[in-house]
Amino acid sequence: MKVVRSKRELRAALDERRSGSVGLVPTMGFFHKGHLSLMRRARSECDTVVVSSFVNPTQFRPGEDYESYPRDEQRDIELARATGVDLFFAPPVDEMYASDHCTTVRVRGGLTEVLCGDPHRRGPEHFDGVTTVVAKLLNIVQPQRAYFGQKDAQQALVVRRMVRDLDFPVEVVVCPTVREADGLAMSSRNVYLSPDERQRATALSRALEAARRAAANGVVTPAEVLAVARGELAAAGVEPEYLELRSLEDLRPVESLERPALLAVAARIGRARLIDNVTLGGAEL
Ligand code: AMP
């Protein structure tokens, strides 16, 4: 595995191996098994696997955890190497953004203004940061496939819409959420949790799973499904930032569970802002 820091080095390394397909796994580093599952999937489907590790400043709001976001590059490099990654792209900020960078890729259409994109939460500008950096990475790497986790379902849907609308010649592959044994979705931010908070954090996946089971067992209205999830959260003393059922296609609120739906939750537990989701009715992203 080669570690590269500049776009020029990355392109040179890709040019050397340009035969066959290229898969890109964009990340912010501090790897866990969720990241590794994306790398493994890419490894099984592509001839060359590129992992980018870049804590993208433009997707953080002032006051969010950009400076304190966990980082351990040496460990990440070892894990990526052991997972069969070919190129580890970890550019400094000024390699990704010229000092006079002034272009933004913005997806709207109701996809980025809701859930995490609500102006009272991370805001649609969070997703502007995501789509801009992902567009840049797609142009730099020019992969045939790019791998994202269902854990960040809204992000995956927003990226997929950008790729469709701007005709990026890439297939967006969404991989299942990897969880701890007790159900907690793996996240780099889980290191912020104290032992007590770590215990309470399991309420998120428990609530989603209870609601999913209720829907599978005949609970039919969105309000009833939401009430099941809300009950589990309340029992653990967790007040969600949001708990919503939305269309898997366009993130509009759903009036019935006959169409593919996403049940998504966000909650602040101690210092950590955690998100999780499930699809209902066996639908896939
Ligand atoms: P991040 O480094 O948190 O920006 O995540 C990089 C990629 O890994 C994104 O596509 C995430 O959706 C994905 N990812 C993060 N956590 C998980 C998880 N628990 N299971 C599957 N994919 C994940």
Image (cartoon, rainbow, N blue to C red):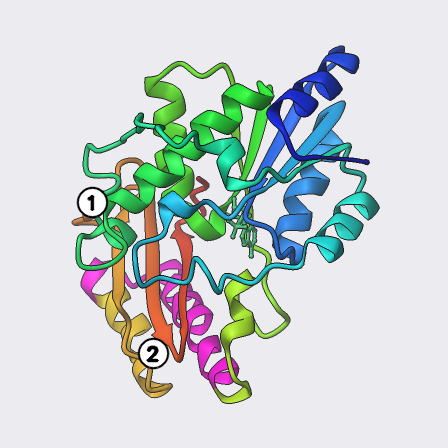
Please, is residue 69 above or below residue 90 in the view?
A: below
* Left or right placement of residue 146 versus residue 285 in this view: right
Residue 220 coordinates in the image, percent (x, y) = 25, 58
- Residue 70 at x, y = what percent? 56, 63
Quarter placement of the N terminus = top right
Q: Amino acid at mark 2?
A: Leu
* Relative depth, front residue between 217 and 248: 248
Determine crowd level at label 2: few under 14, some 14-19, many 20+ residues with C-alpha closer than 10 A: many
Classify mark 1: residues with Cα within 10 Å, few (<14), some (14-19) or many (20+): many
Q: Residue at x 66, y 59 (%)?
A: 72
Overall secondary structure of the magenta section: helix
Rendered residue at 37%/46% (across/down): 59
Extent of the magenta region: 197-223
Disc 2 is placed on an element classified as helix
Please give the residue where the numbered disc 1 appears in the rendered image.
Answer: 113
Q: Residue furthest front?
A: 99
- 30 falls in the magenta region: no
- Specify whether residue 213 is painted magenta: yes
The residue drawn where x is 55% and y is 86% is: 195
Q: Spatial distance from mark 1 to mark 2, Cα to Cα?
A: 25 Å
Which x, y percent locates residue 130? 39, 39
Decide which of 85, 251 is in the foreground and name it: 85
Near-viewer residue (90 or 218): 90
Q: Return the mark for residue 233.
A: 2
Mark 2 sits near ligand 1, with its Cβ under 8 Å away: no
How many numbered marks appear?
2
* Residue type indicated by callout 1: Glu
